Image: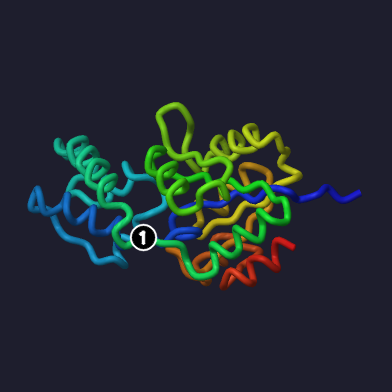
Amino acid sequence: MKTKINTIIFDLDGTLLNTLSDLADSLNHVMSQHDFPQYSADEVRQMIGNGVPVLIEQAIPGGRSNPLFDACLREFQDYYKKHMQIKTGPFDGIMQLLEALKKQGYRLAVVSNKFDAAVKELCHNYFGDLIQVAIGETAAIARKPAPDTVLEAMRQLHVSPQNCIYVGDSDVDIETARNSGIPCISVTWGFRGEEFLREHGASHIARDAKQLWEFIH
């Protein structure tokens, strides 16, 4: 008998929320404080997906070996916390999708490589009780593509991998789903394009929220 899918675990940035402009503005604010290079939104898009420490590592000259790395990381987190809802918002059709899924009884979770406090605040402010569990990066749990955050979401929701589908917009998400033993639906409206996703093993690709709904069903 086929196991019932009753849980959808989402990535956040580039999947549910378009956070690119606020991320780029926050990064460039930090860069300007130290006379470091500025980045276009498209350049920032390519650096997102592995958490803020990796973003800062890629952005500042010398990466983690730069003596200002820790200061830049703190400055980014502090600035972003105060400015992360200036231009951010759900992608087209996402609120309707989440509401329809919740109405049909699906359990909904978010796992992200964004720092945990920001993940929880954004999910609360934009999605309210539609998202039951929201988990971000902390020192206590391995970030994606390790399966730890996904498995923790399953634990909190009292579900098994057989009950779950993962939805994300990047190669990190594809690998995360694989490591977690659950199927992945990749979306094209986020930070990576369809060709890139196919090259990195995407097997199910949704081009809009309506198509994502159809894949889930």
Q: Nearer the viewer, residue 9 or 193?
A: 9
Q: Is residue 169 left or right of residue 160?
A: left
Residue at left 43%, top 49%? 125
Residue at left 42%, top 52%? 49
> In which quarter of the view is residue 96 placed?
bottom right
Provide the secondary structure element on which disc 1 rests: loop
Query: Among all residues in the image, which is located at the extreme right?
Result: 1
Q: Is residue 118 left or right of residue 70?
A: right
- x and y, in percent, of residue 87 in the image: 31, 62
Q: Looking at the image, how many numbered discs can be counted on the residues?
A: 1
- x and y, in percent, of residue 137 in the image: 42, 37
Q: Is residue 111 left or right of residue 21?
A: right
Q: Is residue 106 left or right of residue 202?
A: right
Residue at left 29%, top 64%? 43
Q: For mark 1, does the 10 Å Cα neighbourhood hold few (<14), some (14 to 19), or many (20 or more) residues?
A: some
> In which quarter of the view is residue 39 placed?
bottom left
Whether 97 is drawn above or below 175: the answer is below
- x and y, in percent, of residue 111 in the image: 52, 44
Query: Among all residues in the image, which is located at the extreme top?
Result: 140
Q: Nearer the viewer, residue 169 or 57?
A: 169
Whether 10 is drawn above or below 70: the answer is below
Q: Nearer the viewer, residue 148 or 217?
A: 217
The amino acid on which the numbered mark 1 sits, given as a three-letter code, is Thr
Q: Is residue 63 visible?
A: yes
Q: Quadrant of the C terminus?
A: bottom right
- x and y, in percent, of residue 130 in the image: 57, 50
According to the image, label 1 marks what residue?
A: 88
> In which quarter of the view is residue 147 placed?
top right
Residue at left 45%, top 40%? 136
Q: How is the image coloured?
A: rainbow
Q: Is residue 199 visible?
A: no
